[in-house]
């Protein structure tokens, strides 16, 4: 009875836009530098807070696990925007990630540097951001990624086709039932219209038991111990190849707090799992190479790992989001032509998907403010600040001689 | 002549035109010999006012109760009075404050000496009636806005309507800020037109403010030098102001002339709705929301100065001071025919608030035609200069004398 687990964690922080009024446009070209103490748009404050609560204690545990169990493997992705924030404000956190990769048992995935949805709006820009990310990962971790993850695991046939052509060995997305049908997520698949690349799909049931339900005392699985969880993993069908546990890194210490017992769980889970003869951890690429594709997977529409809808509506679902995304990508030609590196980088940082998420009204309208994770008071404020920044971008472009923006 | 003046707000603690009008009118009346004691519902620093006595009707500090004060938020008013909460400002509602105000004004009225009670708008009417009953002095109610206006031409809050009706019935004299308001009072409150006198508002502008040069709207100033035109709307963002029609008209403007920007200054219960509507119309890049700006501040005035045209598309506007401000600061105005200011100004563009095609046409005409812009500006400014508080204050003084000499039967 042997089982393989692919354990993958996603690390990301956006550069949040400060409250930016129209009075700043034309005067203040710094969008991400809120230094007001203890506010949610103060990026330094947030990264320090999350480093203390999540990155540092979690990496300490992960490093121990990697050192104690040579069979423990981990896959990670870190966006360019979070790495930059580590470099500026939390070098200790960045060092701790480096130490993880130095064990040789951590694979880092490719993605867009700016955690953007550029694939769906500008292929050229998307490829540039993937390239930037690749260089950053090589520079910091000395690895060249062989597996690809898109922002929010947003995926369709086109993306797989692109990743295949780009030479990636693996790509990952959500194991969403309407796509899988009667099939299980616990296999390696081949994306439709591709030859070489393999697709790993998240087992959302077992992943979300940890990521979302871990501290839910109304959940029948509570309290979740490593023991119980490993029992669940071992209880999956014997014929299945690999269980893909994909989650946000910040699950550990930020989404699930220390006192929930999440750190104890993490400390004990790998050892408990490896106790069973034949059980193994694989990285994303290792899993893709080890197992034969069971079938091909056809995804003409876009699937993501988000919300109960598993779509992009949290980012592109309302008119404000359409307007904001259109405003940004309409500027592409002029921004690139300006050859102004600061301007280009600011424009890229504004593509980070989080900005559009803050404009989402689908929970806000229900009055369910707890579901609205945002540094702003309302989606309307988030939108207004963002559009005022767009005006300032236009101002800067105009000063460079790009008049008809 | 001693006047017991009942008002809800005075600058700088105010939410709209009412506060400005009460202040400026009182100043001119004082100059003409009226001895005014002005009763506000809260304590605040009014030491800068030296032409009349300002008395607080409660010991609540302005800053602790500012959130419930809005004289325009009549839709929030119900007829419950929570005596328990009387002393706790945190739990105080606008209803409680109105009741406390009335009670304390009545108490005050029986000790202080005066000849006339002059009450401004619904929140002070109950106080005015009580004061009249206690003292037998004549009551003048001054109508700046009715519930019918605030609800955007609908029935609105019945309790508030009833308060207004009582005030209007009990008044010995009614002052309406426009003929339109007088018609509303006659048609919707069934009041005898004979006791209603129209006195139009005016506005004093500080000349120093007109000649200031720097402008806080750097971006808009810059874009104007690059063939962009700026249309402005400023005020509370609420159904009464008709802004959804302006946005729909502006969509037509943008499709014809993309280099046109709409600056919306202000906040209110329709703020989010307007942001969303602009997005749905696909014109978010052309519509700029500046948020709430204090009416005595530079970012308020600078809006007018950076604008090529000011639009006041109100569905119902008893008077409407902002077009006068706009003209004073240099932006010609397009105003709805449903506003009282329509009766005063000739050299402005006028449109039915619901006629989005006509509104779009007129906006385009001004932003595309320098000549039209220039003549509207020159002529409306000349008109503005001819409008003075002196004349309006004289009319009010006349009403004071008339009513002061009248025997009241109570």
Image (cartoon, rainbow, N blue to C red):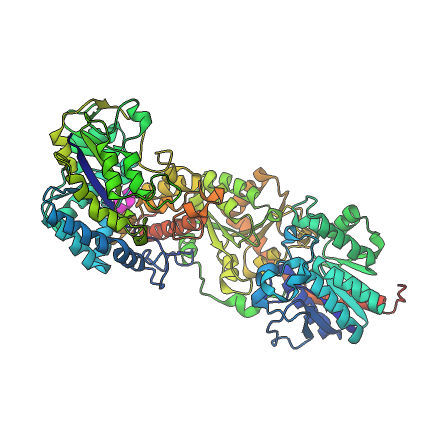
- Magenta-drawn stretch contains A184: no
Side (left or right) of A343 relative to B66:
left
Residue A335 on the magenta span: yes
Residue A114 percent location from the top left of the image: 25, 46
Q: Which residues are magenta?
A: A331-336
> Which residue is located at x 50 percent, y 38 percent?
B252
Residue A311 lies in quadrant: top left
Residue B224 left/right relative to A252: right
Q: Quadrant of residue B168?
A: bottom right
Q: List x then y, in percent, for residue A12.
A: 26, 48
**Closer to the camera in the image, A357 or B214:** A357
Residue A388 visible here = yes
**Dominant SS in magenta:** helix
Looking at the rendering, in which quadrant would you find the C terminus of chain A? top left
Q: How many marks?
A: 0
x, y percentage for residue A8?
Answer: 21, 41
Residue B394 position (above or below residue A147): below
Residue closer to the observer: A156 or B180: A156
Along the viewing direction, whichever of B352 and B377 lies nearer the viewer: B352
Residue A47 or A132: which is nearer the viewer? A47
């Amino acid at each position: 009875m042997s089982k393989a687990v692919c354990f993958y964690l996603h690390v990301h922080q956006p550069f949040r836009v400060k409250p930016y009024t129209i009075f700043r446009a034309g005067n203040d070209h710094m969008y991400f530098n809120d230094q007001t103490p203890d506010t949610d748009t103060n990026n330094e404050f947030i990264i320090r807070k999350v480093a203390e609560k999540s990155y540092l204690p979690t990496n300490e545990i992960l490093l121990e696990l990697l050192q104690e169990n040579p069979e423990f493997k981990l896959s990670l992705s870190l966006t360019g925007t979070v790495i930059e924030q580590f470099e500026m404000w939390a070098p200790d956190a960045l060092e701790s990630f480096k130490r993880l990769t130095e064990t040789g048992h951590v694979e880092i995935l490719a993605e867009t540097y700016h955690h953007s949805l550029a694939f769906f709006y500008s292929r050229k820009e998307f490829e540039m951001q993937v390239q930037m990310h690749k260089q950053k990962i090589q520079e910091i971790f000395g690895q060249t990624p062989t597996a690809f993850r898109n922002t929010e695991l947003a995926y369709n046939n086109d993306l797989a086709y692109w990743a295949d052509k780009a030479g990636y060995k693996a790509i990952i997305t959500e194991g969403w039932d309407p796509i899988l049908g009667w099939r299980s997520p616990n296999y390696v698949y081949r994306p439709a219209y591709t030859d070489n690349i393999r697709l790993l799909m998240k087992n959302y049931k077992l992943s979300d038991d940890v990521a979302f339900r871990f501290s839910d005392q109304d959940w029948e699985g509570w309290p979740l111990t490593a023991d119980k969880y490993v029992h669940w993993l071992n209880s999956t069908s014997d014929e299945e190849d690999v269980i893909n546990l994909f989650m946000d890194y910040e699950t550990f210490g930020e989404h699930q707090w220390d006192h929930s017992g999440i750190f104890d769980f993490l400390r004990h889970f790998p050892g408990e799992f490896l106790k069973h003869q034949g059980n193994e951890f694989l990285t994303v690429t290792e899993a893709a190479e080890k197992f034969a594709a069971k079938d091909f997977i056809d995804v003409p529409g876009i699937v993501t790992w988000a919300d109960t809808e598993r779509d992009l509506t949290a980012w592109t679902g309302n008119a404000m989001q359409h307007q904001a995304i259109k405003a940004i990508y309409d500027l592409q030609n002029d921004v690139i032509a300006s050859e102004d590196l600061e301007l280009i980088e600011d424009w890229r940082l504004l593509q980070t998907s989080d900005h559009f998420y803050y404009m989402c009204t689908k929970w806000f309208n229900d009055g369910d403010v707890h579901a609205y994770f945002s540094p702003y008071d309302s989606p309307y404020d988030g939108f207004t600040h963002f559009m005022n920044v767009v005006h300032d971008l236009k101002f800067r472009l105009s000063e460079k001689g790009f008049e008809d923006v | 002549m001693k006047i017991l003046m009942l008002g809800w707000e005075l600058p700088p603690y105010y939410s709209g035109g009412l506060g400005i009008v009460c202040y400026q009118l009182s100043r001119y009346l004082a100059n003409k010999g009226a001895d005014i004691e002005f009763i506000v519902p809260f304590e605040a620093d009014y030491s800068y006012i030296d032409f009349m006595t300002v008395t607080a009707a409660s010991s609540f500090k302005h800053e602790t109760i500012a959130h419930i004060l809005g004289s325009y938020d009549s839709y929030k008013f119900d007829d419950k009075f929570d005596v328990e909460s009387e002393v706790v400002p945190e739990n105080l509602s606008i209803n409680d404050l109105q009741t406390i105000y009335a009670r304390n004004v009545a108490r005050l009225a029986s000790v202080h000496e005066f000849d006339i009670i002059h009450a401004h708008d619904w929140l002070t009417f109950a106080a005015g009636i009580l004061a009249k009953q206690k003292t037998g002095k004549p009551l003048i109610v001054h109508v700046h806005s009715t519930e019918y206006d605030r609800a955007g031409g609908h029935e609105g809050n019945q309790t508030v309507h009833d308060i207004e009706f009582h005030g209007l019935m009990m008044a010995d004299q009614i002052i309406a800020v426009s003929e339109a308001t007088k018609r509303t009072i006659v048609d919707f409150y069934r009041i005898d037109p004979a006791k209603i006198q129209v006195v139009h508002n005016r506005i004093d502008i500080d000349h120093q403010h007109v000649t200031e040069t720097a402008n806080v709207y750097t971006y808009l100033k810059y874009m104007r030098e690059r063939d962009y035109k700026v249309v402005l709307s400023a005020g509370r963002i609420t159904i009464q102001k008709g802004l959804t029609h302006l946005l729909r008209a502006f969509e037509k403007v943008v499709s014809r002339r993309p280099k046109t920007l709409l600056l919306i200054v202000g906040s209110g219960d329709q703020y989010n709705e307007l942001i969303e509507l602009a997005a749905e119309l696909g014109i978010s890049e052309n519509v700029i929301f500046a948020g709430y700006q204090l009416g005595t501040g530079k970012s308020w005035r600078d809006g007018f100065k950076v604008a090529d045209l000011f639009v006041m598309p109100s569905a119902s506007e008893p008077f409407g001071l902002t077009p006068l401000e706009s003209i004073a600061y240099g932006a010609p105005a397009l105003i709805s025919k449903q506003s009282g200011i329509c009766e005063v100004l000739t050299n402005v563009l006028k449109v039915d608030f619901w006629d989005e095609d006509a509104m779009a046409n007129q906006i385009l005409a001004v932003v595309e035609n320098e000549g039209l812009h220039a003549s509207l500006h020159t002529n409306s400014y000349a008109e503005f200069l001819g409008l003075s508080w002196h004349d309006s204050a004289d009319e009010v003084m006349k009403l004071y004398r008339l009513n002061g000499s009248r025997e009241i039967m109570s």
